[in-house]
Image (spheres, rainbow, N blue to C red):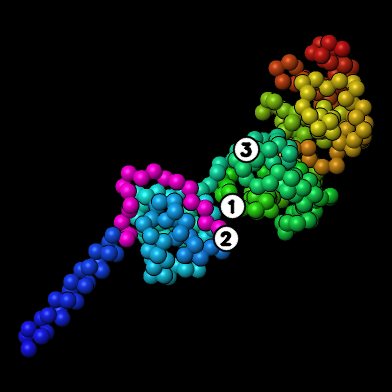
Amino acid sequence: MRRGIVTPLIVLMVTAIGMTAMVVAAVRPIDPNGLPRIVFVPKGASSAEIGTRLETAGVIRRARDFVIAVRLRGLTRSLQEGEYRLSPAIGLLDIVDRIARGDVVLYPVTIPEGFTARQIVDELMKTGLGDRETLLALVRNGAMMFDHAFLRTVPGVSLEGYLFPDTYHIPRHLDEPAVVRLFLDRFAEVVLPRWREASGGRSLHEIMTVASMVEREAKVPAERPLIAGVVYNRLARGWKLEVDATVLYALGRHKAVVTFADLQVNSPYNTYLRPGLPPGPIASAGLASIEAALHPAETAYLYYVARADGSHVFSRTLAEHQAAVRRYRGR
């Protein structure tokens, strides 16, 4: 009787030890010194499909081990698409958890203050984040595609000036609307509370248009509120703003010197020809320029001219301004 009981127990113990050894072998890293590699998980891929990709990439031993681990952890419906940086030095369960959490590769993209929407798209292209033509179409004409409430107050369909300049960490699998949405979300987070608190009755579009001109005109930080003050002073008098940066925007290219011929460009953005504000922002303003547009200097200045070093001479009268122009521009 005792021998009949002991023999099955021994078999069970041996079987359990064998299964444990198999599990340990399945979950331990393939190569503790293995180098990371990128594995792409497509949208809607099954655990079997993902396991096959992982096995092919050499980060797990067998695809079926991944499938079993996913089921045992109850994560079959949690696996997320995207690029993953994985290594043979990572255990199977860690790999499962990373894909379930969506720990995808993020690509840093820094958008400088003063970039136009086109320049922002160019910067995204350097990292391969989206299709260029699709992104250009969105930023030029896609305002109505997004559900951000502040866009309902913006005339037109362009997103120029509303793509907040900042450093973003973007996964490559996002589609183009999702990429643009990151910029709009950041704008809503950073800019809207400041505008609501200090708009002084000015519309968001007016503030962002003035801020964009300040951004492109000011080279010395301390001059931003003064430039904003000049813009508002000229607006109050119904004068043409005569801002060189708007002419460059109309031309669609940067130039070190704006010529008299440039000032004749036929565009609603040419503030030398048309009074009042241009139709909208000419760039994405940074926070300092937005603050200047919200809190302009209280000044009597009506003119300014740039020195060679990028700083400006501010004047109250046309005679003072003309003297400054002759001195610093030789005309």
Q: Please tell me which of labels 3 and 1 falls first in the chain.
A: 3
Q: Looking at the rendering, in which quadrant would you find the C terminus?
A: top right
Residue 15, located in which quarter of the rendered image? bottom left
Residue 201: image tag: none
Is 77 within the magenta?
no
Check the image and name the residue furthest to the bottom.
1
Report, in whole angstroms, how far the alpha carbon at label 3 lies from the one at label 1: 15 Å
Q: Position of residue 306 (x, y in %)?
A: 77, 20
Q: Nearer the viewer, residue 150 or 46?
A: 46
Disc 1 marks a residue whose amino acid type is His
Q: Is residue 31 left or right of residue 51?
A: left
Question: Do the residues under discs 3 and 2 have CB atoms within 8 angstroms?
Answer: no
Q: Position of residue 160 (x, y in %)?
A: 76, 43
Magenta region? 26-42
Disc 3 marks a residue whose amino acid type is Lys
* Residue at the (10%, 85%) spot, across then down: 4
Q: Which residue is mark 2?
A: 43
Q: Is residue 75 left or right of residue 179?
A: left
* Residue at the (48%, 51%) spot, across then down: 39
Q: Which residue is mark 1?
A: 173
Disc 3 versus disc 2: nearer the observer: 2
Q: Is residue 94 visible?
A: no
Residue 126: image tag: 3
Residue 318, located in which quarter of the rendered image? top right
Q: Please tell me which of labels 1 and 2 falls first in the chain.
A: 2
Q: Looking at the rendering, in which quadrant would you find the N terminus?
A: bottom left
